[in-house]
Structure formats: C-alpha cells, structure tokens
Image (cartoon, rainbow, N blue to C red):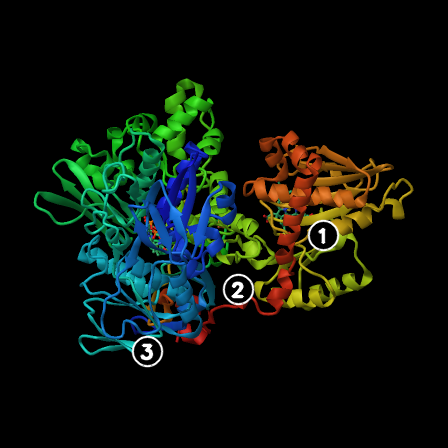
C-alpha cells in the first residue's frame, strides 16, 4: 500500500520535491498538501514582474490544478495547518481536517518581518511575500498616488520599481547610508541610487522611520528627523523570519529555523523540513537555488536513496528590475585575510567587485555589466585556487587568454552535481545520464528528456559542450549563427526564450538572455521586435524605435531623403475614382514621379516627409490604404484577368487575388511576402516565382510556394492541390502563419523552406487538418490587431513628431 | 562678424525627442539631427551621412551610435565618425542640456558661410 505523505506548505521548495517524487517514484506515496495560500504553486520570484505588469499571474503558475489531478495529489488550498501531533502522526488543518501521515514534510517558508513601529497595523501597510500582497499593492496603485517602501534591499527595490511602473510616486526609505550595503560598497550603492532616481524613484538613505501616520488608513510616514512623507500605501521589505513556530510547538528541535541534517531529517525521523523554514549547518537560506537542492535531497531521502546529501550552498542573486543589471554571488562580508579587486568605469556605469580569500574567489558583485556573472559564480562554487588567473580575473573569461579551458574541457572539469540549467534545476550528472541511457545525440534530445536549456536557453552553450564531451567526435555541433554581435544566441534560441520564458518586451529579452550591449543594435532590435509581435499579438506594443525607417514611417525612403508612397490596389485592380485621386494628390503635392510598379501598383515617388500625412489623408479620403510596399509583411497580390475576361481562364483569379489580399493584408512576417494568382497554367501573373502563388486549373487550385525572382531566381514548388477557393485560402493562411512563427527574421519563404524541408511544411499545413485549423486560428487572431491602416492612424495624429521638425532656426537667429 | 563666444539656441524639450530616437532641427546651415540615446544622453550632428548623404535622423539609434537608413553605416554620435571598416565623418554640432531644454550652437563659421 502507498505510504501517506503529508506536506505543510506548497511553496517553491516542496513543488520541486514533488516533481522529483512523481518522476522517480510514481505511486509510491499517497500525497496530501496543506497550503495556507488559496492557490496552486507558483513562481514566487516572479511576483515583481506581475507587480510591474510585465507578466500575469497565469504566466508564473508552476503547477496548475490539472497537474495535481494528473498525479493524484490532494491539494487543500487556503487551509493552514494548526497543529502537528507527532504521537498520533496526524496534522490538523484550520478547517478541522485531520490527516494521518507516515512521512511529513514541513515547508512553511518564511514570514516577512513587520517592524512594530506606531501605525504598523493601519490599513495600507503591506509586506511583500505573496500574491495577496501584490494584489493589495495594485489596489493601492489604482486609487492612490504615493507609495513608501521601507527597506532598500532586493525586495524593496523590486517593489519600488514595480509600483513606479504602475504610475505611483515612490519613495524608498533605507536605514543604512547606501542601498544594498550588504552587497555593494558605498560608491556602487550610489550608482544604484542614481539609477533608481533616474527612474523617478526617490531614495532616502539613513532614514529611520519613526511612525506610520493615519487614523484608520495610512496617510504618510514620519522620520526620526521630523520629515513627513505622503503615503497611500507603505510596503515593508525589511527582512524575513523562518516560519518555525508550528514545528516548535510540536516539540521538533528549532533554532532560528527548523534544524535539519544532511538528508533533510528534523529531530523526528519521520518528519523532514525544507525550504526557507529549514536551518542547515547554521544557515537559513532565502533564495531558491539552495531550496531546490534541498528538495532533491528530501525526495531522494523519502524514496530511500541514501546516496543523496545536502552540504549547504553558495548563493547568487540578480536584481530583477528591468534595465538595471545587478548580480551578486557568494560572500562579501569584510573579514580578516580577505582582499578585494574592484573595477570601476563610471562613464559606462559599470562596477565590479571580487572578494578573494587565500587563493580562492569567495564573492562577486557586478553592476551595470553582469555578462560574466555565471563564470564568476562557477569559480566561487568550484572553490579552487585561482592562481595565475588573478591578474586579469576581473575582466572576465574573455580576457583569460590561454588560462581558460576550451568549453569541452571546462565542462568536463565540473563535478556531476554542478547545476547546468538554472531554470529547470538540471545538473551535469542528470544530463550525462540522459545522454547515456537514452542514447541522445542532439541538443533537441537533451531538451526533450531533461528540460535542460529548454526554457531561457542561456545554458545552451554548456549543454552543447557536454554533448561534445560525452560523445566525442560523434557529436556534430549544431552551428548557430548568432543574431548579431550583441549575443551568442541564434534566432531560434531567442524565439524559444520569448515563448517559453513569456518575455514580453525587448528589455525583458535582453535582460533574460544577458545581452552584451545595453540596448541592442540595428540587427537584433528589429528581429526581437518582430518575434515579440508575432508571439504576443494582443499584448505586445510595437516599438517604433526598433523599426527601419521605411516601416517606421510607412513609406519607402529614397536616395535623396524623400519618400515614395504606394497605395493598395487590391489584386492590381483600380478604378477611375482611385486614379483621379492619385492624380490629384500628385498635382497638389508636386510629386515628381508617378510610376507603375512591378507588382501591379502605382508608386508616387519623391514625396517630402512633411507632406506624407497630407498625401495619405487625401488617399484615405478616396478609400485607399497603405500598400505596405515597405513592409516585412504582406506586399502585393498580383493577378491576371482570369475567367472573367480571358478566353483561357479557368477560375476567377482576379477575384481570388483580391480575396487573398483583403484577408492577408497588414500581417507582419519575417521578410516580405509576395503573392500572385494566375487564371491558367499560361501563368500571366507569374505566380510560379512568388513566395506564394496560385495557378488555377479546371479542377481547382494549385498552391505553389517558395519561389523567388530577386537576388536569386527560383521557381516555386507545389504545396497542395485543392478543389475550392475556401480551402485554397485556408491552406495559404496556415502556410503564412507557420512561416511567421518559424521563419527567422529576414529569411524569405524560399530560404525558410530550404532550411526546414518541404515535407515538414506539407505535413503541417496540408496533412494535419487539425494543426492547419489551429494555425489559421492564430493567424486570424493576430490579424485582429494587425489590420489597422497605418496611414489613417498617422493622419489622425499618431507619431506626429516624426513628420515635423523639432525646431526651425531662422537665418537671423543663426547669424545675427 | 559677430564677437560673442557661443550663442546657445533653445530648440525644445528633451522629452519631445523619442528615447532612442532623433528629431530634426531645420537651420540655415541645413538640417541638424538631434539624438536622444537610451540613457538620455543628447547629441547633435549634421543630418547627412558621410557615405552618400543619408538622413541620419531616420536611422536606428543604439547605444551611442546610429545606423544610417540608406546603407547601414554605423556612425558614432559622440564624434560623428563612421565606425568599423567604414571611413568618414559627419560634422558635430555643439549641444547641451539646460534643465530639460535642449540647446544647440551653430558654429559661427558655418553660420557665416550660410549667409
Ligand atoms: C517599386 C519596385 C520597382 C518598380 O518600380 O517596379 C521595387 C522597388 C524596390 N525594390 Fe523591388 N521593387 C519592385 C518589384 C520587385 C520584384 C518584382 C515583383 O514584385 O513582381 C522583385 C522580384 C521578386 C521577388 O521579390 O522575389 C523585386 C526584388 C527586390 C529585392 C530582392 C529580394 C530578394 O529576396 O531577392 C529587393 C531587396 C530586398 O528586399 O532586400 C528589393 C527592394 C526594393 C526596394 C524596396 C529597395 C529599397 O530598399 O529601397 C525598392 C523600393 C523603391 C520604392 O521606394 O518604391 N526588390 N522587386 C517594384 C514594386 C513592386 C510592388 O508593386 O510592390
Ligand atoms: C517578491 C519576491 C522576489 C524574490 N526574488 C527572488 C529571486 O530573484 N531569486 C531567488 O532566488 N529568490 C527570490 N525570492 C525568494 C524565494 O521566493 C523564496 O526563497 C522561495 O519561494 C522559498 O520557498 P519555500 O518553499 O521555502 O517557501 P514559500 O515559497 O514561501 O512557500 C511557503 C508556503 O507555505 C505556506 N504556509 C506557511 N505556513 C503554513 C501552514 N501552517 N500551513 C499550510 N501552509 C503554510 C505559505 O502560505 C506559502 O505558500 C523572492 C521572494 C519574493 C517574495
Ligand atoms: S531593381 Fe529594385 S532595388 Fe534595384 S534599382 Fe530598381 S527598384 Fe531599386
Ligand atoms: S548614405 Fe548612409 S550609409 Fe549610405
């Protein structure tokens, strides 16, 4: 019979232990979890992005209800345990539930410390620990204007940044002379303070809070020196205390936290403790990495695997305020015999500090440029003499010349329990075991079987090095072309990270993937902008500063700095009314050239920038919209006359072309997309050299794709033959969406097809009918937000600054 | 000929220039591109690429550089020099911030030449 396992607390630590248990010993335990919070397990460390609005609660859920159901685990939400009866081996919940156990895990986490100054019980005083606190802050932000955060550590600063992004005026009160004084020296603390001030957050150091003011609700805060600061909400982020009371009351040995041994046993052999409530080797931890290690050991202990032991952890942390890069790892307390190496580059706002004890690196703080954080962290954990590295150490791995090992040798030197993938807590040993047991030979295989490198992807290089190390010559390294010089990651890596990591802004992408430049370059920014737009069509707001000029101004720049304007002529068909309007516009704005284009449109060339809105307004008035002649998106659909007039025409090619153009216009894609529809195989619309082409035949429609006739000439290949127009439109929309989701930025359809293979495309958009419908659905969803005429928006005033000078300096003022 | 040192001309507020963007100031010596980098640093250059005269104000601004919209030369905002393998330089225009006001100065020689 299954043993009864009861868990008190459903935070991040037991969540991880459960994952190991269900994977290693399915069915061995009958599991019941009591959770004081009325919800499932979520990623507590991501509360700050929820507060700032960069993520939603759904984005940070780790295990949803279905997960518990699938694994037969009983989760009692909103039901705190009030007592443990060790003699009877039962726990009692607040609602009276009594649950018997064979084994018990206490994982009650910690509680935020509330300083008992006058006023601390007023409504509007909140801590920062769980979703309820975030909700309370959001509520305050919705009605109030002023927030005070007490405590200038990691949590306090994240809360302050979040509240500021929600539009509040925020003041941080910090007791010490500089921020984060435990990690940073005063100069670096100042850099951080300036960065916060620059975001409009007031920081007051040496601020001793005397009282919180207000009758029933907070109205302000008074400092010892008499200063008063307005506040509609006060967030206390001054520290945490392990939740050990329940365990203590039941007679388990407790110091600051619940005492545990290397196998996570408490003083009662049937009771384990893990997470922030536990104390191991004199330390209570407050970061997830050590708790994850504890979780693995606890699971192993329960299963009866005596080999696992927890030996304490070195910790590293990052400040999660978008745009401020701060990383610290190890121990940087001032102690005898310790030395420091410090690098400052005030112009770049960079500060690095290394703490060395004996011959070993024991601590590192990086501010402004955190790219080498992982490398320093490895050195700290490696605990080996740094020897000759020392002189150049602070410049990071790039400057180590022959002293650093090539990647394969470097991973070979790591111990088996070194964590390779931080997101999913996968160690070197796990990966090597999977490679050996499952016969894996590819990165994709390792991702599928271990999850390593499957989330943010920053550890991809290490995983590849491990594959090379394990397989020797048998491993053919996937060659990734980096997006640009700002990163080592390839396009697919970035996209996966956006999707899996739910990254929703350029800043978030660059932060999460450790971009090497502060704000990207002209290569990566447009690519990231497109990937975000494609992945989050409803949520992401286009970043015009990451668009090339043509797409930013919705007109093509010419060699003399004027622009060309191409209105849409659906399917290449126009009317006297439209032609008259085009002629009038050309006259009115003195447009020098009017030309028929290769794509069956009319191009007005040589328009002055300041005239663009006027030209568009007149074209709009005649019913014309942007032809997107500038877009990495749908360009033109060329048609021939087809069955309506032509003696050979088999179908209404003109009508189908217009239908397609009206359905597909506005969509952004990796590169431009051109279509054509010909009414018979004589192919007068040249459909067989387009990105997507349709050749009509008696029995229906031949859908072609992957043609090109520019830098490279290539005929199309046939994707499918269908009988009806509706099917034809559906297959084309699915094809376009697959390309949008899968094509790399600037990769045209023919290149994409050559990379992914024709068979794969056919399988997804032709054979898999369900999959096709899903693609179409995603396409149509994104069209809801994309089919807005950019010209009309600008005529109505959007981006007006683009079209007018900032100032005009007359002659007299310049040279009086 | 004028005798004063520098005449600073107020051309508007910094917030009217998009972050990582640029606005044009039309002047007797030709268009001037005023840039605002991600860190709020402000620069001003003649709005002409040293390559073939492309309007730098229309390029993508990244760190303290701009990529020309015509053929992707990367120009340093601080010096006006082309970077990387390309060679050429766009004249710098003196610029400073006075509170939130952007002030530029037209070099006298240029202003005279324009007269
Ligand atoms: C206007 C037009 C020439 C004309 O006067 O006929 C034209 C003009 C330009 N083409 Fe084109 N192409 C035009 C038809 C074509 C065609 C023929 C066609 O579409 O049927 C092709 C070959 C078909 C193809 O795309 O495969 C063509 C292949 C290119 C290429 C090469 C693309 C490739 O991947 O090989 C470029 C370069 C690029 O996109 O990077 C290009 C780029 C350009 C640009 C956008 C160059 C630029 O970046 O400034 C020109 C913009 C001028 C302007 O301001 O309007 N144009 N260009 C044609 C507009 C078509 C339309 O109605 O929308
Ligand atoms: C805003 C914020 C940002 C953070 N950022 C980072 C970061 O960037 N990096 C990092 O490493 N760490 C970060 N942390 C810390 C990290 O979240 C914690 O270390 C981790 O969540 C602790 O896990 P745990 O399982 O021990 O406890 P918790 O996740 O706190 O879970 C304990 C759970 O037990 C429940 N509980 C308590 N008592 C009882 C009871 N009697 N009966 C039933 N249930 C009970 C609680 O309601 C809670 O849900 C952050 C924390 C916060 C609040
Ligand atoms: S072929 Fe196209 S890109 Fe070349 S000059 Fe003509 S319009 Fe310009
Ligand atoms: S004109 Fe600027 S790069 Fe050619």
Does residue B1 show up?
no
Using the image, tell me which numbered label, if any, was put on residue A219: 3
Residue behind mark 2: A802
The reply to whether the C-beta atoms of the residues labelled 2 and 3 are less than 8 Å apart is: no
Q: Chain of mark 2?
A: A
The reply to whether the C-beta atoms of the residues labelled 1 and 3 are less than 8 Å apart is: no
Residue behind mark 1: A663
Viewer-proximal residue, B47 or A512?
A: A512
As displayed, is residue A536 above or below residue A173? above
Residue A251 coordinates in the image, percent (x, y): 23, 49
Q: Is label 2 within 8 A of ligand 1 (CB to nearest ligand atom)?
A: no
For disc 2, the neighbor class at 10 Å (few under 14, some 14 to 19, many from 20) is many
Residue A11 coordinates in the image, percent (x, y): 37, 50
For disc 1, the neighbor class at 10 Å (few under 14, some 14 to 19, many from 20) is some
Viewer-proximal residue, A192 or A421?
A: A421
Does residue A526 show up?
yes
As displayed, is residue B111 above or below residue A225? above
């Amino acid at each position: 019979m299954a043993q009864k396992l009861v868990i008190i607390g459903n935070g991040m630590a037991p969540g991880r232990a459960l994952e190991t248990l269900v994977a290693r010993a399915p069915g061995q335990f009958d599991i019941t979890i009591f959770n004081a919070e009325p919800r499932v397990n979520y990623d507590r460390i991501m509360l700050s992005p929820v507060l700032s609005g960069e993520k939603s609660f759904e984005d940070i859920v780790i295990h949803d209800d279905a997960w518990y159901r699938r694994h037969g685990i009983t989760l009692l939400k909103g039901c705190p345990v009030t007592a443990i009866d060790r003699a009877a081996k039962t726990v009692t919940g607040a609602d009276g539930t009594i649950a018997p156990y064979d084994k018990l895990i206490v994982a009650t986490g910690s509680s935020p410390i509330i300083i008992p100054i006058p006023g601390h019980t007023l409504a509007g005083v909140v801590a920062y620990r769980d979703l309820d606190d975030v909700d309370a802050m959001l509520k305050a932000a919705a009605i109030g204007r002023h927030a005070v955060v007490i405590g200038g550590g990691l949590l306090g600063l994240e809360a302050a940044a979040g509240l500021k992004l929600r539009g509040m005026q925020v003041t941080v009160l910090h007791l010490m002379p500089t921020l984060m004084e435990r990690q940073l020296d005063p100069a670096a603390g100042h850099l951080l303070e300036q960065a916060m001030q620059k975001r409009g957050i007031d920081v007051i150091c040496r601020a001793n809070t005397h009282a919180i003011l207000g009758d029933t609700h907070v109205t302000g805060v008074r400092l010892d020196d008499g200063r008063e600061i307005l506040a509609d909400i006060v967030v206390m982020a001054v520290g945490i205390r392990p939740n050990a009371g329940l365990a203590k009351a039941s007679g388990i040995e407790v110091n600051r936290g619940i005492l545990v041994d290397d196998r996570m046993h408490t003083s009662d052999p049937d009771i384990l403790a893990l997470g922030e409530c536990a104390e191991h080797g004199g330390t209570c931890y407050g970061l997830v990495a050590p708790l994850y290690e504890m979780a693995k050991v606890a699971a192993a202990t329960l299963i009866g695997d005596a080999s696992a032991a927890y030996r304490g952890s070195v910790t590293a942390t990052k400040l999660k305020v978008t745009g401020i890069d701060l990383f610290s790892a190890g121990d940087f307390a001032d102690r005898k015999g310790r030395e420091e190496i410090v690098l400052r580059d005030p112009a770049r706002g960079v500060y690095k500090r290394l703490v060395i004890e004996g011959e070993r690196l024991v601590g590192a703080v990086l501010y402004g440029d955190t790219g080498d954080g992982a490398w320093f962290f490895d050195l700290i954990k490696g605990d080996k003499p740094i020897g000759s590295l020392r002189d150049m150490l602070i410049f990071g791995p790039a400057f180590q010349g022959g002293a650093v090992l090539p990647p394969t040798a470097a991973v070979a030197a790591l111990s088996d329990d070194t964590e390779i993938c931080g997101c999913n807590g996968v160690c070197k040993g796990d990966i090597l075991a999977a490679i050996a047991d499952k016969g894996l030979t590819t990165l994709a295989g390792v991702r599928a079987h271990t999850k390593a490198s499957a989330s943010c992807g920053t550890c991809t290089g290490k995983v590849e090095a491990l594959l090379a190390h394990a397989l020797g010559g048998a491993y053919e390294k996937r060659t990734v072309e980096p997006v640009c010089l700002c990163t080592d990651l390839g396009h697919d890596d970035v996209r996966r990270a956006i999707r899996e990591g739910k990254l929703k802004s350029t800043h978030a992408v660059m932060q999460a993937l450790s971009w090497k430049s502060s704000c990207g370059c002209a290569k990566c920014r447009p690519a990231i902008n497109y990937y975000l737009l494609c992945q989050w069509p409803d949520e992401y707001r286009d970043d015009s500063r990451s668009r090339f000029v043509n797409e930013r101004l919705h007109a093509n720049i010419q060699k003399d700095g004027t622009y060309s304007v191409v209105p849409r002529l659906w399917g290449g068909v126009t009317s006297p009314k439209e032609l008259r309007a085009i002629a009038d516009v050309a006259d009115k704005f003195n447009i020098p050239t009017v030309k028929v284009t290769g794509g069956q449109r009319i191009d007005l060339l040589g328009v002055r920038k300041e005239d663009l809105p006027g030209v568009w307004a007149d074209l709009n008035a005649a019913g014309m919209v942007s032809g997107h002649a500038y877009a990495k998106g749908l360009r033109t659909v060329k048609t021939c006359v087809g069955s309506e007039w032509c003696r050979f025409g088999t179908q209404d090619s003109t009508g189908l072309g217009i239908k397609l153009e009206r359905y597909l216009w506005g969509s952004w894609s990796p590169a431009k997309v051109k279509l054509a529809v010909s009414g018979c195989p004589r192919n007068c619309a040249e459909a067989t050299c387009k990105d997507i082409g349709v050749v009509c035949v008696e029995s229906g429609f031949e859908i072609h794709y992957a043609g090109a006739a520019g830098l490279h000439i290539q005929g199309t290949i046939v994707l499918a033959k269908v009988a009806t127009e509706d099917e034809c439109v559906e297959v084309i929309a699915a094809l376009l969406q697959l390309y949008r989701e899968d094509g790399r930025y600037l990769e045209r359809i023919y290149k994409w097809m050559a990379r992914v293979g024709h068979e794969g495309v056919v399988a997804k958009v032709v054979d898999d009918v369900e999959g096709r419908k899903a693609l179409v659905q995603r396409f149509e969803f994104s069209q809801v937000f994309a089919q807005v005429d950019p010209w009309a928006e600008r005529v109505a005033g959007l981006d007006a600054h683009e079209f007018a000078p900032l100032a005009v300096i007359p002659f007299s003022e310049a040279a009086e | 000929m004028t005798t004063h040192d520098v005449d600073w001309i107020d051309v508007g507020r910094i917030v009217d220039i998009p972050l990582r963007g640029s606005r044009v100031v039309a002047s007797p010596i030709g268009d001037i591109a005023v840039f605002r980098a991600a860190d709020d640093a402000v620069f001003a250059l003649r709005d002409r690429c040293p390559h073939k005269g492309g309007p730098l104000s229309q390029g993508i601004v990244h760190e303290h550089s701009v990529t020309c919209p015509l053929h992707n030369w990367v120009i340093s905002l601080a010096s006006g020099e082309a970077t990387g393998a390309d060679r050429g330089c766009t004249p710098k225009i003196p610029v400073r911030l006075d509170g939130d006001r952007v002030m530029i100065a037209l070099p006298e020689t240029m202003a005279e030449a324009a007269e």
